[in-house]
Amino acid sequence: MRRASFTDMNCSVAQSLEIIGEWWTLLIIRDAFFGVTRFDEFSDRLGIARNVLTQRLETLVEHGVLTKVAYQDKPVRYDYRLTEKGRDLWTVLAALRQWGDKWAAPDGPPVVSTHRACGHEMTVEPVCSACGEPVTRASLSLHRGPGARADSPLPELP
Amino acid sequence: MRRASFTDMNCSVAQSLEIIGEWWTLLIIRDAFFGVTRFDEFSDRLGIARNVLTQRLETLVEHGVLTKVAYQDKPVRYDYRLTEKGRDLWTVLAALRQWGDKWAAPDGPPVVSTHRACGHEMTVEPVCSACGEPVTRASLSLHRGPGARADSPLPELP
């Protein structure tokens, strides 16, 4: 079953999901952040069907989220490593983790974070890049940007 | 085709994806943030098959991300509104949007944000909840938390 594509949608959320929104993909990326690089290790940790894993990894390589680096010649075997584009997905994983910690972890967070610089257990907080104050959705207004087309998902605003 | 469930995984990313990781779901939530509440409007804006939209909305209601509020009696018709749990997904959408703006928007962002309080065009920046300094994945160390089971995805750490 080929699912609908979001490629033509004029929306960065849709474009991101086109690359990383398939079932399993963000868990593969999570494990890449934990240092997993080998096909068999992804397969063992996730319990994912090998044909699905192959397809997901190839999509991520194709979009430059992972890069394949041969670590063995005969037969050739690859490490899958996060690129800068892939490492930038950390904010997405952090947001998903914190939402799950708050709303879907009745026994408390399975994983907690410490900020190395200050030494405290912490969460990631969203602040404004301009003034540094905490932000929520309600504190922002959205506008058409330079890449907006007529079919931008932004509704007409007053 | 029923996809594998992440329910048994001891990971808040997996638990979040179990609720919102299906194809289309985050675009439905995006549109809910834009003020869309009616089935037909979701359907028109997204171009999603009605049976798929029905299933996605029901899953979100079942998990308390959306709530159904009748706006008409005969026949009964519902508005779908974000709950507090749903509004908390804003950080996930913001992270996805910014990643797409950076890596998948060659003509520039389709949508830009202004912080109402300071008046500047801005992005959402992740900072440490304890000290307020900017953080990246590399500046954090992860540890087993109170909800960790033996099968926590966190690898053994030195």
Image (cartoon, coloured by chain):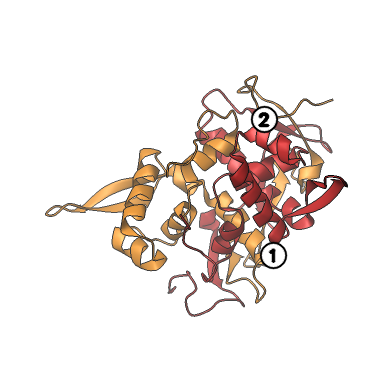
Chain colours: A red, B orange
Q: Residue at x 80, y 26 (%)?
A: B157
Q: Is residue A11 left or right of residue B128?
A: left
How many marks do you count on the picture? 2
* Chain label for disc 2: B
Q: Residue at x 50, y 31 (%)?
A: B7
Q: Residues within 10 Å of mark 2 (few under 14, many from 20)?
A: many
Q: Earlier in the sequence, mark 2 or mark 1?
A: 1
Give the residue type that dot 2 points to. Pro
**Eye-nearest disc, 2 or 1:** 2
Q: On the image, which quarter does residue A27 sit in?
A: top right
Instruction: Please name the residue that numbered disc 1 is placed on.
Output: B102
Residue A130 vertical position relative to residue B15 in the rendered view, above or below: below
Q: Residue at x 59, y 38 (%)?
A: A48
Residue A70 image offset from top left, x and y in percent: 85, 49
Q: Are marks 2 and 1 on the same chain?
A: yes
Task: Give the quadrant of the C terminus of chain B.
Answer: top right
Q: Nearer the viewer, residue A85 or A50?
A: A50
Q: On the image, which quarter does residue A12 sit in?
A: bottom right
Q: Is residue B75 left or right of residue B33?
A: left
- Element on which disc 2 rests: loop
Q: Nearer the viewer, residue A137 or B34?
A: B34
Residue B80 image offset from top left, x and y in percent: 33, 52
- Element on which disc 1 rests: helix
Instruction: Please name the residue that numbered disc 2 is placed on.
Output: B153
